[in-house]
Amino acid sequence: LTGPAVNTPNVIVNVEQSGRNDYWGMMLTYSISEIMQARLHDLETMLRRVMQMERETGEQASILYFMDLTGLKYDKRLVNLLTGALSGISAFMSEHYVEMIHTFVLLNAPSFIAAVWAIARPLLPERTRNKVRILGSNWKTEVLEMAVPEVLPSFWNDDKTQAFKAPLELAEPLDPAGYYKEKPNESAKTLSIGPGKTGTIDLKGSVIRWCIHTDGHFGYTVYYAENESIQEINSMLNIYPIFTKIPGPTIVPLKDELQCQESGVYKFWFSNEHAWLHTLNIRYLIDVDAQP
């Protein structure tokens, strides 16, 4: 977040180095839940800034989201990211934050952007697709029509242009020495869920810790019920974020813990509803501290 665009009223500029960011390194280092939590922190920060501007101006505000594609490479990893992790993150943004975004502006697009867009476009929710704008070779002039130079990164300057003034640092790749290397625990249990189906694991305790590996895309959340007689999900209290589609197979397992404030049943809900043919296998380790 670099500040108000000014040239576009009531919007705040956010610059993401989409081409330089080491998304594959992130996937090999952190679980998708950790990446989603980091993204959630970013989105909540944006939302706070938008709400602050709205209080100051009395008008609706939003985010002008520049996506710099400098350095983007077209390879199998990119395709896997577009159809997996990045589509899952995009779906989460669309479900919860898309109204906060004024426009996604893709700039410095490579020659293969048409091929990338052909893959990504069908995977994006309609509300997100409608907010995407792809700039051409004259993008440096176009972005200055959208926002003042003070909020646009100085690394866009070159021998021909010295207009941009925001002192942002360039993204750096993650160190491969930090990649996740642990082998799956042999004591893990397996929950298999058929295509188009859901599955649950019921637990009781004061603290629940879990570690999850899957062999495909999946959805999951946690519900709470006062007693075991309550079986309908719609009658339960949702106490954990609902992830409708987390990309898999997982490279780094999902790990988290839940402090259980009430006695009762905590139902881990897993979804394979998006699948037509694949049976989802979830390998899990769950540690429970008994309720006092």
Image: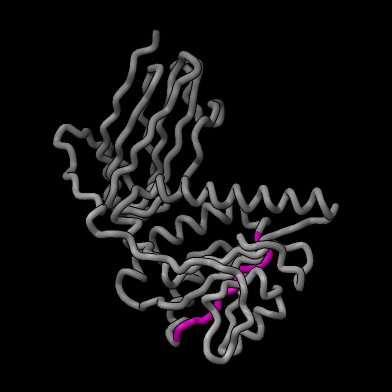
- Residue 268, compared with residue 159, is above or below; it is above
Q: Main secondary structure of the magenta part?
A: strand
Q: Residue furthest left?
A: 186
Q: State the image coordinates of residue 212 (x, y, percent, origin top left).
A: 30, 39
Residue plotted at (62% across, 74% down): 165
Residue plotted at (67% across, 75% down): 149
Is residue 188 visible to us here?
yes
* Segment colored magenta: 101-110
Q: Quadrant of the C terminus?
A: top left
The answer to whether 163 appears left or right of 184 in the picture is right
- Residue 244, compared with residue 187, is above or below; it is below
278 or 145: which is nearer to us?
Answer: 145
The reply to whether the magenta stretch includes residue 111 is no
Q: State the image coordinates of residue 206 (x, y, percent, origin top left).
A: 40, 17
Q: Quadrant of the N terminus?
A: bottom right
Residue plotted at (48% across, 68% down): 17
